[in-house]
Amino acid sequence: MTHVTERSGAGSGPVGGPSSTEGAGHQPWTAGAGRSGRKRSVSYADAGVSIHAGDRAVELLKSKVRQTRRPEVLGDLGGFAGLFRLDTKKYRSPVLASSTDGVGTKLVIAQQLDIHDTVGIDLVAMVVDDLVACGAEPLFLLDYIATGEVVPEKVAEIGAGIADGCRYAGCALLGGETAEHPGVLRPDEYDISATGVGVVEEDEILSPERVEVGDVVIAMRSSGLHSNGYSLVRHVLLGAGRMRLETVVEEFGRQRTLGEELLTPTRIYAQDCLKLIAETETRALSHITGGGIPGNLVRVLPENVDAVVDRASWKPQPIFDLIQAKGRIEDPEMESTFNMGVGMFAIVSAEDADRALATLTGRGVDAWQAGEIIEGTGQVQMIGQHTRG
């Protein structure tokens, strides 16, 4: 974020400036102009927007944002636009990739618990792991925060999480916007989104056309729910299930509460996947978000093959069992809503399967062979049953 403005509000927006009938020596507009006894002028703060609070939030964030700086970044925070010098000499035929996303209703949990330094990591993950899915290196990210009231410390916490996520992804937090929306959002409400830009060589773009019969499907474990399905989660656990966020759930271990589990940040795979691409014959990457495993893995398959994924190759985290049991949710609904313990799939050549697993394991990623590519019609076949208990 670079500065603060109002994008919407209750009633009319800020007023000011002369009308067409006013002369050069006009006086500032005042409420009830022309009426006797009412001379007090109206300020932006009266409408609920604090420019000073926004400036304070930016100051609190500057050191964090500078930690995401890449050599290509020009200038500093506070400008009208972020500047990034793309070194075209590094590439033969560079293609820019872009992605935009948000965090969704996971933000409701953060607001209820008054914990705001993790959802920024989720935001970055949603954007950069979409970028790397086509083989692109994330270069920079722009964020957008809309809130009912700018509380500098809270905005700084959100921004710090975004900056941390950018560091993990190796991209620069180039700038952004914080908008105060009094009358539209409650003072404690906010929403966040971001747009990222990456670069990939044209002849190295990952696409379904690269996937072949005999390839291997590698799974990378998620950190939990990531950032999808939270409307269903809140309905099942906090609504019908009447659970409290402060409740310690024994199955989670380490005296971990439900709220802590639900706010676990999304795993960022961008740098791990770039290393995988560099070390192996990677055919495709599938970021498992809304739509679950079947809905996302199918997006990287050509029409002449199927992906066979064996559920028995992994055990989902306890949070998925809890949600399914509390909500009496059928397996197909679970698999079309949640990642079920897998945040990213890689499809690699069979010859490189062992190297792929070694590369990911060496980077601290829990990865395993979850399936294979066979002749088919562009479908995902889920076979076997997850280990339970």
Image: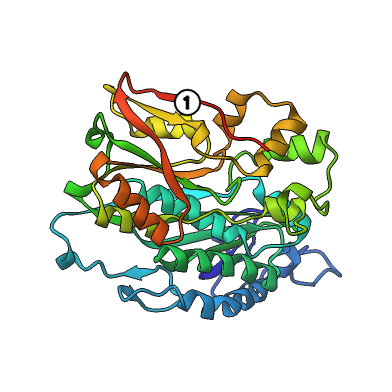
Q: Which picture quadrant has residue 283? A: top left
Write the residue at 69% across / 35% down.
Answer: 232
Can the viewer see residue 34 in this picture? yes
Looking at the picture, how far across and down is residue 61, in whole percent? 57, 76
**Crowdedness near tag 1: few (<14), some (14–19) or many (≥20) residues, C-alpha within 10 Å:** some
User: In the drawing, does residue 2 fall left or right of residue 45?
Assistant: left
Looking at the picture, how far across and down is residue 56, in whole percent? 63, 78
What secondary structure is marked by label 1?
strand
Q: What residue type is labelled 1?
A: Met
Write the residue at 39% across / 55% down.
Answer: 360
* Residue nearest the viewer, comparing 76 with 249: 249
* Residue nearest the viewer, comparing 174 with 331: 331
* Residue nearest the viewer, comparing 252 with 198: 252
Looking at the picture, how far across and down is residue 63, in whole percent? 52, 81
Looking at the picture, how far across and down is residue 275, in whole percent? 32, 59
Write the residue at 73% across / 59% down.
Answer: 254
Residue identifier under label 1: 382
Write the residue at 53% across / 39% down.
Answer: 314
Q: Which picture quadrant has residue 322? A: top right
Can the viewer see residue 349 in this picture? no
User: In the drawing, does residue 370 fall left or right of residue 46?
Assistant: left
Q: Quadrant of the C terminus?
A: top right
